[in-house]
Image: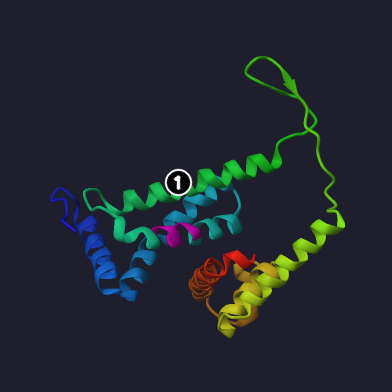
């Protein structure tokens, strides 16, 4: 990784951390990059989506994507610029998905040719076959969660089965909020790789 000589001292410092993370697998370098930018990325998402829990999830997802793509980062521009681009794209994708899920179905949609289209909404109640398939998938996912170490499994259960906030999980487990966020990030990453290996069964 050749560094751009015009970068600031902070950008150069980031580059050294990236280099240690990629070339040496230095977990402390990953942690320091996370610590430097987590709060600013989080507050950007709070303003962007207007929900703290969504902002937390988007922050975790952003760093997950960034760290997976770190070997492809080119230091001809600042790491922070690259990271914020990933974060912004992640937020835009989230808002698009949310918009698709919340648009009004009462009004007709006008096509490019001026034609009006109405939407035939299927019942929200699944038929017996759909219900069986959904239950089977949920059971497979539970089995995959069971493969996690107990502390990670507990975090996934509290966050996604009991729908607790990060603050509530921290209070329940009597752990610092930062520890909960870091461990949940790790838990989701581990679960992602387990699911990826067994994708054909889901």
> Badge 1: few (under 14), some or many (20 or more) residues near its Cα, within 10 Å?
some
Residue 105 appears left or right of 8: right
> What colour scheme has been applied to the protein in the rendered image?
rainbow
> For numbered disc 1, what is the local secondary structure?
helix
Res 40 quadrant in image: bottom left
The residue that appears at 59% across and 82% down in the rendered structure is 174
Q: Residue lying farthest top?
A: 114
How far across and how far down the image is residue 24, in percent? 25, 74
User: Is residue 196 covered in magenta?
Assistant: no
The overriding secondary structure of the stretch rendered in magenta is: helix
How far across and how far down the image is residue 179, in percent? 50, 76
Q: Residue lying farthest bottom?
A: 150
Res 28 quadrant in image: bottom left
Between 150 and 6, which is closer to the camera in this rendering?
150
User: Is residue 65 covered in magenta?
Assistant: yes
Task: Check disc 1 and report the residue beneath it.
Answer: 88
**Residues rendered magenta in the picture:** 61-66
Between 123 and 2, which is closer to the camera in this rendering?
123
Q: Quadrant of the C terminus?
A: bottom right
Q: Is residue 143 above or below residue 59?
A: below
The reply to whether residue 106 is in sight is yes
The reply to whether residue 162 is in sight is no
Residue 161 appears left or right of 81: right
How far across and how far down the image is residue 79, in percent? 29, 54
The residue that appears at 62% across and 18% down in the rendered structure is 112
How far across and how far down the image is residue 195, in percent? 56, 68
Q: Is residue 16 above or below residue 25?
A: above
Q: Quadrant of the N terminus?
A: bottom left
Residue 196 appears left or right of 4: right
The residue that appears at 41% across and 50% down in the rendered structure is 86
Q: Residue lying farthest left?
A: 5
């Amino acid at each position: 990784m050749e560094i751009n000589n015009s970068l600031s001292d902070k950008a150069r410092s980031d580059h050294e951390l990236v280099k240690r993370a990629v070339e040496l697998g230095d977990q402390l370098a990953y942690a320091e990059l996370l610590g430097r930018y987590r709060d600013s990325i989080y507050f950007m998402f709070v303003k962007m989506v207007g929900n703290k829990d969504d902002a937390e999830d988007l922050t975790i997802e952003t760093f997950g994507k960034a760290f997976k793509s770190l070997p492809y980062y080119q230091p001809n521009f600042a790491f922070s610029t690259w990271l914020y681009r990933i974060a912004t794209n992640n937020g835009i994708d989230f808002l698009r998905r949310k918009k698709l899920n919340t648009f009004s179905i009462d009004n007709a949609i006008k096509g490019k040719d001026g034609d009006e289209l109405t939407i035939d909404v299927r019942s929200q109640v699944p038929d017996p076959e759909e219900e069986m398939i959904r239950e089977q998938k949920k059971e497979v996912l539970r089995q995959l969660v069971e493969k996690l170490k107990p502390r990670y499994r507990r975090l996934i259960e509290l966050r996604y089965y009991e729908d607790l906030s990060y603050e509530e999980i921290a209070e329940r487990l009597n752990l610092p909020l930062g520890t909960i966020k870091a461990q949940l990030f790790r838990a989701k990453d581990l679960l992602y790789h387990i699911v990826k290996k067994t994708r054909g069964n889901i």
